[in-house]
Image (cartoon, helix red, strand yellow):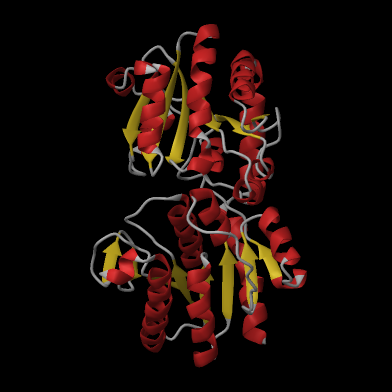
Amino acid sequence: MRILHILDHSLPLQSGYVYRTLGIVNQQRALGWEPVLLTSGKHYAPGPMRERIGEWEFLRTPVPSGLAARLPLLRELTIVNGLGRRLDDVIEEVRPQILHAHSPVLNAWPALRASRRHAIPMVYEVRALWEDAGAVHGTHSRISLRYRADAVTTICEGLRAEMVARGVPSQKITVIPNAVDRGTFSGPVDPDRALAVSLGLDGKTVLAFFGSFYSYEGLSLLLRAVPELQRRQPDIAVLLVGGGPEEDRLRATARELGLGNALVFVGRVSQGEIRRYYDLVDLFVFPRISARLTELVTPLKPLEAMAQERIVVASSVGGHRELIRDRETGYLFQPDDPHSLAESVLAALADRHSWPRIRAAAVAFIETERSWARSVARYREVYRSILRC
């Protein structure tokens, strides 16, 4: 079975979106299927129209340029039209049996039209709601969408409920949850002391966040909790691995609070190196703010930390509550509240005798419910149902 995956962006860019894609297509290949990968004009990393990275070849769509790259509505229209033209060429070449378009809706529109032109069934995978992400970033207002794909998949129950509320028949929707590969995140080893010393973290109690620095991640709340945390436990430091549009603002907040060496930015780290940084961390903190996006959508990074047998402290937004049970598989705190964050972190640190039980429960949750093998197996019936139509 050959599936054409239509993507917003891919490697060499790094994001939760990219790692979900890799989890899906690696497992699909293991099942004997033939995934083919095409990115839209939103994939901004320079490169050839056919780009091999590791075991995968990525087909590209031209990126808007000139005036079309600068004007918002014209940019989106150019992305949609360019992807439509590129789909015609790629479909003619690879002859897929299924079109599998992944969020955002800028991929769904041209994929749906190509599906009708070429008489190929289409799946639309809703990973987030484009207008909600845009509203959080301050770039778009909420719009109403209708989904007319042959099947719809989502990454979590929150998005499934939203799709039903928007008029999509519930029987048409399948949840394919975020997952992790335990072979990649296989548990802690002794920390790399030389790395800890180089970062100024040797002998510190390390709180960490790994991921993209977007406003909805609530990282400023974590920074604002640090002075209170240090008053009560002076050896606390914060390690931030990643990058994104909030980085300059976070650095300014750190200067305002006088955090100095208590906060370490290391930038983005490759998958091959990330294990060394995991092993420096005592607690992972995921302080997402409460917003439509975070209440509906489950993130990937907490699962990765749990798979690495790390203790997770997270805000009690809907997306986190689908992954974490308070004091069973991690710790939850009131969102948007630095004091609640600090209290939860301190409570978790005081509860170290429970950590072996919490780690074991988190790993069991991943192995029984959130492995890529279990998640991707759900596509089998989705694909079969639309091929029978």
Q: Is residue 294 above or below residue 256?
A: below
| Residue at image location 75% in from the left, 64% down from the top | 165
Camera-side residue: 301 or 340?
340
Q: Is residue 69 above or below residue 371?
A: below
Q: Quadrant of the C terminus?
A: bottom right
| Residue at image location 61% in from the left, 30% down from the top | 359
Q: With 359 as the anchor, is 245 left or right in this view?
A: left
**Is residue 64 visible to the viewer in this orientation of the structure?**
no
Q: Give how far across and how far down residue 61 sits, in percent.
A: 33, 73
Camera-side residue: 120 or 40?
40
Camera-side residue: 125 or 55?
125
Q: Is residue 108 above or below residue 96?
A: above
Find residue 313 and report its image quarter: top right
Q: Give how far across and how far down residue 146 sits, in percent.
A: 65, 73
| Residue at image location 39% in from the left, 72% down from the top | 74
Camera-side residue: 327 or 31?
327
Find residue 141 and report its image quarter: bottom right
Q: Give how far across and how far down residue 197 sits, in percent.
A: 30, 17
Count of residue discs: 0
Q: With 236 as the anchor, is 55 left or right in this view?
A: left
Q: Is residue 387 above or below residue 273?
A: below
| Residue at image location 64% in from the left, 33% down from the top | 335
Q: Give how far across and how far down residue 177 sits, in percent.
A: 62, 55
**Is residue 293 visible to the viewer in this orientation of the structure?**
yes
